Amino acid sequence: MPDAPTLDHPTFKAVKAAFPGRKFQGTEFRAQSTLIVQPQDLHEVMAFLKSDPACSYNFLSDVIGIDYHTYPAKMPGRFAVVYNLESYARGDRFFVKTYLDPTLPTDGTADDPALYLDSVTDLWPGAEWTEREVFDMFGIRFRNHPDLRRILLWEDYPAHPLRKDYPVRGRGERESYRIVDRTSS
């Protein structure tokens, strides 16, 4: 098992050296390092993390969405997208996070231009399914994605249910289901 990463993790230094004029933040929590990037820089930084021999993050384990609506602390944006990277050569795990702040109300299906990121499917083809899940559940769209459509819910579903402003009981989607009991099945 590798040594516990710290804020002087070598990947932080490599990214800072490769992108001297860019704004980054780094965090460490429970021996896990996270690089926070601006949304417009995400794809370029991810390409660097994969292709640079000093980094060599050749496996994208997961892409997740987070909604910080009603979160007690002030966050840089309401939504975050987190990429879980791993380098097989070093057995090293590294997280990349970017924040998005909506410009339109999030209680419907409005196509907000502020909730777009560049897809990383050209770097890691396995990102196709996880980016689709983030789109389906949070409404964050990925430019240049080869097949961006819902993956868990039907295509006409009226919202994105993991957004915190989505009602827990839904908006009437379940009321139209036929009830199946033992006599009708």
Image (tube, helix red, strand yellow):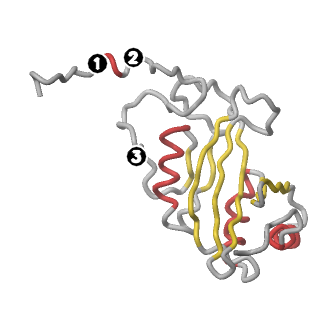
Tell me the SS state at disc 3.
loop
What residue is rendered at 58% in x and 42% in y?
A: 140
Residue 130 at what x, y percent from top left? 50, 54
Label 3 near label 2: C-beta < 8 Å? Answer: no
First in residue order: circle 3 vs circle 1: 3
The residue pinned by badge 3 equals 151
Work out whether 61 lies above or below 172.
below
The residue pinned by badge 1 equals 176
Label placed on residue 172 = 2
Tell me the SS state at disc 2.
loop
Dot 3 amino acid type: Ile
Dot 1 amino acid type: Ser
Residue 59 at what x, y percent from top left? 58, 71
Residue 154 at what x, y percent from top left? 35, 37
Dot 2 amino acid type: Gly
Instruction: Report the Cα–Cα distance between label 3 and label 1.
Output: 21 Å
What residue is rendered at 52% in x and 60% in y?
A: 127
What residue is rendered at 26% in x and 22% in y?
A: 177
Work out whether 179 lies above or below 123.
above
Q: In the depicted view, which residue is nearer to us: 27 or 129?
A: 27
Label 2 near label 1: C-beta < 8 Å? Answer: yes
Q: Please tell me how crowded label 2 is: few (under 14), some (14-19), or many (20+) other residues with Cα within 10 Å.
A: few
